[in-house]
Amino acid sequence: MNLMIVEDEIRILNSLVHNIPWEQHGVEVVATAENGREALELLERRKPDIVLLDVEMPELDGLSLAERIAAESPHIRMIILSGHDDFTFAQRAVGLGIKRYLLKPAGEGEILQTVLEAAAEVRAELVERHNLADLQHKWRSRLPQLQETFLRSWMQDGYDGWELLRHGEELGLRLPADSRYAVVVCSIDPLAEGERRFTASDMPLLAFSLTSIAREFLPASEGYAFSGADGQAVLLFVGAPGESDNELMKRVHIRCARLLQVVKECLKVPASAGVGRACRLAEAKTSYREACLALRERAVYGHELAIPYLAAKDEPPPLQLDAAFEKQLEIAIYMDTKEHMVELVDNYMAQLLEQAGSSDRVYEQLLVISSCFVRLIQGQGWSLQRVLGDDYGYFLSLQSLLSSEQIRAWSRRVVGHIRTYAEESRRTTSHHLVRQLVETVEAQLSEDLGLHTLAEQMYVNPSYLSRLFKKETGTLFSVYVQERRMERARKLLQDGAKVFDAAAGVGYRDISYFAKVFRKHWGATPSEIRK
């Protein structure tokens, strides 16, 4: 604790400096002065916490000096040391906020105790000031987060008018009660098929970047930008004094169009925005809800747009699936190419989206066509999850398809999955039939192996079975059977079987014919092989 002593009598000054054990009590005498003028010159350089001063001094008396100190450095504690018990002096001292007035000759112990009491007050004040500064720093550092939390909560839950004004004032937000407001909700558009730089896992980072760009883009004089509940960027525009709704909305749309351009330039991905209508302060939540509904219209209008909210029209007639289209799609599974199926569905979806008129109609139509896909898949006895893979999740939440481009891409993938699964299913079935036929041949080499008989046993068309076997094995069924019989016959003969028994074991009743076929196949007679 720093102490300055101001005393014009040298003897008393030296006694105060040297006879009192200041350092033992944490006090350091940083300056001494013999008059008020000298004291003023030392104050700025030495910066004492406490000043012990005499009243009667030349050039500038103690109380005049105290007035200057109180005016310029009110945090300094002052202790008056006077040789006169004068009420007028005491009264002036109290008026300057001086609480300690000692009469000469005051004892050294009394002076030390008085200085230590003043030092304790200074320390307490420093602690309080430090704590207050620390709290203010913490408040300022957290203020942006508190403001964002309040704004997000306002859009979602709403507040009464008086709550808005009170909280806004507490958080340093400019929310004039007589201004007009408009809310914009901005979101990164769904990633296009074939996008290589970003994946679905990057969407939270892109959403964060979008909000950061919006904060920098929107001037503080025009409103506030913050992150919404679903990772969207929300912009609250505050109308200027006297600005009409038309003027405000014109400014909003100009800002939005430029923001979408900046996002595309910075992030290299498109974004869209929904724009709510102009409103009063208490209706900002409604404007926010309108902006969210407008953003959903990407399902109709596509990407990279600032879409204004339009009030709902009269209820349109219910949507029905074109029965001819569903029949065409069912036939195409087995008759047409994958490309033709995709083209069929893509054209149909393009027509539906063009005629829908609103996102509600789009999602209603998605329910209808998704039911068509479900019937098509289950009608074949297939599992939806197995056929659709990752696209199965969209059937559980069709509204996660956010734009017309994403909807059409999804429908293309779905029919692609169906066609691919149909082809794999046919191959699997074909392999099963061929395997079953081979197993039957191995088990019945000693019996009649006519293709028609076997086809009847397997409940398939003989011609289809013949072509299937040739396609899968590369050889005719009759040739395969003969080769297997000749291989079995040779093994039987080499194991010691008689020619008659070997012929019977592979389905030949005429031994001479068996011998002729055997010799032609192996280049040796059965008897020669047996030996």
Image: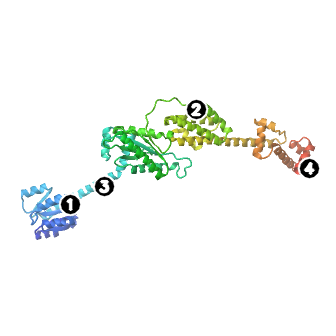
Checking the image for residue 119, the label placed there is 1
Q: CA distance from mark 3 to mark 4?
A: 109 Å
Secondary structure, mark 3, is helix
Q: CA distance from mark 1 to mark 2?
A: 89 Å
Residue corresponding to mark 2: 321
Can you tell which of label 1 and label 4 is closer to the viewer?
4
Camera-side residue: 123 or 188? 188
Q: Earlier in the sequence, mark 1 or mark 4?
A: 1
Can you tell which of label 4 and label 2 is closer to the viewer?
2
Q: CA distance from mark 1 to mark 4?
A: 128 Å
What residue lies at 47% left-to-right and 48% top-to-bottom? 204
Checking the image for residue 134, the label placed there is 3
Q: CA distance from mark 2 to mark 3?
A: 67 Å
Which kind of residue does numbered mark 4 sit on?
Thr
Relative placement, left or right, of 513 versus 308 is right
Q: CA distance from mark 4 to mark 2?
A: 71 Å
Residue corresponding to mark 4: 525
Secondary structure, mark 4, is loop
Which kind of residue does numbered mark 2 sit on?
Leu
**Vertical placement of residue 160 versus 40, above or below:** above
Q: Earlier in the sequence, mark 1 or mark 2?
A: 1
Residue 263, horizontal then vertical, whole percent: 45, 50
Q: Is residue 363 visible?
A: no
Q: Is residue 362 visible?
A: yes
**Vertical placement of residue 354 versus 474, above or below:** above
